[in-house]
Amino acid sequence: MKVIEINKLNKIYNESEVKVHAVNNVTFDIEEGEFTAIVGPSGSGKTTLLNMIGGLDIPTSGEVMVGGSLMSSLKGADLTDFRLHNIGFVFQAYNLIPVLSAKENTEFVMRLQGKSKKVCDARTKELLKAVGLGERMNARPAKLSGGQQQRVAVARALASKPKFVLADEPTANLDSKSTETLLDIMEKLNREENITFIFSTHDARVVKKARRVITLEDGKILSDVRKNGGE
Amino acid sequence: MITSIAWKNVWRNKSRSLVVIIAVTLGTVAGVFVAGMLNGWVAQRINDVIFTELGHVKIQNPDYLVNEQASHYIANISELEQYLKHSKDVVAYAKRSKIMAMASTARGNSGIMLKGIDIENEKNVSGVYKQLLPGSGSYFEENSRLPLVLISSKTAEQLRLKNYRISNHTTDSLSMLNVPQETISKLTPIKDERFITRKKFESAIKGLWSDSEIRSYGPHLMNTAAYFQPNAKITFSFTKANGQIGYLTCRVSGVFKTSNNLFDQTSAFVNHTDLINAAGLQPDQFHEISVILNPSVKDIDPFIKSSSNQFKNLSFLSWKVLAPDAGLMADFIQVYYYLIMGIIFFALAFGIINTMLMAILERVKELGMLMAIGMKRKQVFSMIMLETIFLTLCGSMVGMVLGGLLIKITEHTGLNFSSVAEGFESVGWAATVYPAIDLSFFFGIIILVVIVAVLSSIIPARKALKLKPIEALRTE
Ligand SMILES: Nc1ncnc2c1ncn2[C@@H]1O[C@H](COP(=O)(O)OP(=O)(O)OP(=O)(O)O)[C@@H](O)[C@H]1O
Ligand SMILES: [Mg+2]
């Protein structure tokens, strides 16, 4: 089943004197359960592409369909609501609310969705254990390492069982050890929960873990490779 | 959940929030206390107006209002009394005969309104009997062949009955107050000399004491050196009912001082029977009736209306009409409180807005992330608004408690403004203020605080709403 269908997607920035064709006529689909890396040099359009898939940015032309519904038909509060219910986000930094504990951060999206405390509680505990933070549930972000913070962000993104999780360079600020741990966790959750992951990266070690690698250059797809059976 | 995040966000930058909270606290304390003072002052004035000077309602012959002549007495008094006795609203009333008189002593004279009262019943209506100056005598209890009269301290001064003398008692009391012996001994040249006016005494003191000594010890010296001539006699002269000149010579029974100089200057009290005998009036001829109403009667006007309907030939006036200054204050005092608080909070709002703007500027990326993951603009808006409300409410709660405590502390001791209040006393406003406040005022403040917080959160919250998630999130 197709989770995401992208058709002739373009993004052109007109702000400066030179036009920047950040995403250039990109077409591809993402199947349910895929674990996809978007790679490419800096400025190749990875962030721009992910933002359009996530409904954070508006394409210049082309379409993004998520679960069969056209993203560009949504606006304002409806779009926010769509993100809330369908997409999990992990950013490079500033993922967590500093005044909330790891547990409260993890259940935040579910609480926004209006899920009951009991449901949130069980799911949060399960996920924090899965990301190896069962013991640090009540710690605030400032008391956690960068890698641990990203793991909380992954737990939050998954908590409400979204259609897919978007992660823009989730490991950019991490050392190699934490990078490996985070990727292993993401991979494990992808398998266990059958949640679709799309993440961008520069890092060759991260690319190795992906089962599908889409390479961008100057906003165009250079290659799209599926590996069988992971590594 | 948004509420709890907002609350936690308040304490994120503790020192910055505390600065605002302290500012709001101080503003609230000041506002509450000033309002308390104003309130106490007005309540006192109203209390004096009603329970010393006027009563709730004054009944007169309308002609007497135009021309204060002895012949304009209340005509159908027994019928009126029946009515008052049976009215559920009336707690007490006092009848008074009144006559304009010239009061004279060997040294001075003064025009005055001589009021003939029922000595015992008058106590139910007017608190003058409680306001006798210590050492000045008693409320009609002196032994005398002559009729007794109660005069005010102001009248005593005008009639030169208030004298000044530096006695042993005076110097003792000064040294008790730790006035330096040197300063006291400067007074020796005028020891035991009698000064019949305050002016003369003051100029004598000016010759002996330095300005700074007068400033520090003068008021106390004035108080302890003053005394009322014992057994003083006053002769009142007036036009009798038959048009001839009548005289009434009285002995001073006591000297009173209320907070209203004007009332004091124009009032002297004698026994009703003494007055009518001298003035040739009949025993049932009275010129005014002061009525005290039940405390449960909140609005006096219905009573006045129905009474006026029954007794069309009489004038019924409420204290609000007779003392318009106090009446106006009673009606508008609430407006003043909220005006004071409003001005204070208006000024504070700028600080609050500034703080919230800073708090948002710091959190641009976090707010972008929140909107990206699915927090609606409405929710972001209410989070910022709640933060502002909590911040403001915190300060004003503490401020209300402190302001309330300050009022509780000063409630009984009062605050003395006599150094600046001579002007106020002359128009009936007390120099010592006993702050007091209604609980309802605090509820009013809370509502005001919420309004101010909501209004001052609009600018910062709008700023937050203008953020676009991707732009806010872009990592540089
Ligand atoms: N808001 C913008 N206005 C103008 N140009 C932009 C804007 N955002 C991105 N670009 C341009 O679009 C192109 C693609 O940028 P994008 O951020 O998507 O690349 P990226 O692959 O994510 O790079 P990196 O690996 O450095 O994160 C770049 O040339 C960039 O300068
Ligand atoms: Mg990028």
Image (cartoon, coloured by chain):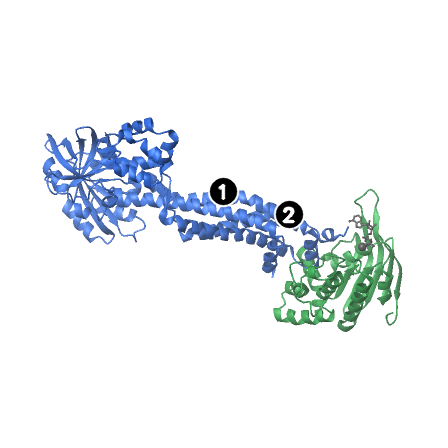
Chain colours: A green, B blue
Q: Is residue B231 left or right of residue B355?
A: left
Q: Which mark is residue B88?
A: none
Circle 1 residues within 10 Å: few <14, some 14–19, many ≥20: few
Residue B448: tell me if it is visible.
yes
* Residues behind callouts 1 and 2 on a single chain: yes
Above or below — where is B67 with respect to B131?
above
Give the Cα separation between the discs numbered 1 and 2.
24 Å
Circle 2 residues within 10 Å: few <14, some 14–19, many ≥20: few
Q: Position of residue A64 (x, y in %)?
A: 78, 59
What subunit carries mark 2?
B
Q: Secondary structure at mark 2?
A: helix
Nearest the eye: A83 or B403: B403
Nearest the eye: A133 or B390: A133
Residue under pointer 1: B343
Q: Position of residue A224 (x, y in %)?
A: 88, 62
The quadrant of the picture occupied by the N terminus of chain B is: bottom right
Q: Is residue A148 left or right of residue B111?
A: right
Above or below — where is B378 with respect to A157?
above
Q: Which mark is residue B358?
A: 2
Q: Amino acid at mark 1?
A: Ile
Q: Position of residue B21 (x, y in %)?
A: 55, 50
Image region (quadrant) for ligand 2? bottom right
